[in-house]
Image (cartoon, helix red, strand yellow):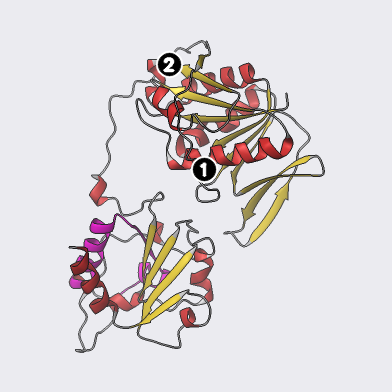
Amino acid sequence: MNNVLFIAPAESGRPLSRHAREALAAAKGLADVMGQKLVVGLLGDDVQAAADSVGGCGASAFLVAQDPALAVSRYATDVAAAEALAKKAQTGVIVAPADTRVSRFAAGLAQRLDGVCDTQLTGLAYKDGKVVATRWYYRQRMVADLTRGERPWVLTVMPGCFDACQTDGSVSVEAVDFQVPETRTEVTGIEAPPADEQTIRPGAELLLVAGAGWMKKQADGATHVDEAGSIILEYLDKTKASLGSSKSLVDFEGDAVLPFLTHMHQIGQTGATPRHPKGLATCCHGEEPHVVGWRFITERRAVNLDAGCGWAHGKADVLYVADAFEVMKKVNELLG
């Protein structure tokens, strides 16, 4: 029961997602320091491409649960497949990505295995003979180290906390039999906005954050809300960056607002805490309540006309003292 099992859903004929490869790196690191074997478990319709995308990770076995019913996300089928993988692996620790599909069945998997579950983790370690899981609480302002004696222990890992596993290679997989449960629902399709209309992109390399300065009067004494919106959207379209916002902008109560912003875009003390590798702040002052949401951004840059703003006081790696309208228009022009 000391094996470390990595479990992830796989899309048909496609490599594992970056988030899943990050969770695999976490599982491998834990197995190595524990001196135990790593077992990879994949579930889906056709998972060979996913297995090959991480074939060189050093796992002792690649277990797969494959069935047409696993082509779509459904609790009943996913948890049954994951249970079969866990029992075959004879594992005490199960690591998985904290994506929407895994989050739906992780607690149910722990219950079926008579184990325990902890989710949304940001770190895994092995200290004094114990597995230690790190989790943030209270809007990322308190951190706790968790240990448990119960096994199996199901652990789901947040994105952006580990370097993604990049070791591909052809592998042989071992199919695991499981009973596909009778289902009462049928997935007939997925309705989603076009990718170009999606402005919240957790997997993006870059985060663009807009502040209230976009909505205020400019040098000519007038506001340019429509122009601000077109500049921001053009940049997002060309870079495929993710969009965030300061609280002051999503709460803006002027005559005109940016129609594509919602409170889901809010970054900061009362908003989200994303984990993109790079971040660019525009027209926001970088004060502490806002910068709380930037604590996991590796490289920070900002554009602001105020050379004395919070970004200039050690909160940004680079501050451009300039007009964000002019800077971003020039950037869009250079992007072509």
Residue at 49% across, 81% down: 310
Give amino acid for label 1.
Answer: Glu
Q: Label 1: few (<14), some or many (≥20) within 10 Å?
A: many
Establish if 303 lies above or below 136.
Answer: below
Helix, strand or loop at mark 2: loop
- Does 101 appear above or below 296? above
Residue 152 visible to an observer of this rendering? yes
The picture places residue 333, in percent across and down from the top left corner, at 18, 68
- Give the residue at mark 2: 183
Q: Position of residue 175 (x, y in %)?
A: 50, 13
Q: Which mark is residue 22?
A: 1
Identify residue type, mark 2: Thr
The tag earlier along the polypeptide, 1 or 2, is 1
- Element class at badge 1: helix
Query: Disc 1 vs disc 2: which is toward the camera?
Result: 1
Identified at 22% across, 63% down, the residue is 335
Residue 269 visible in the snapshot = no
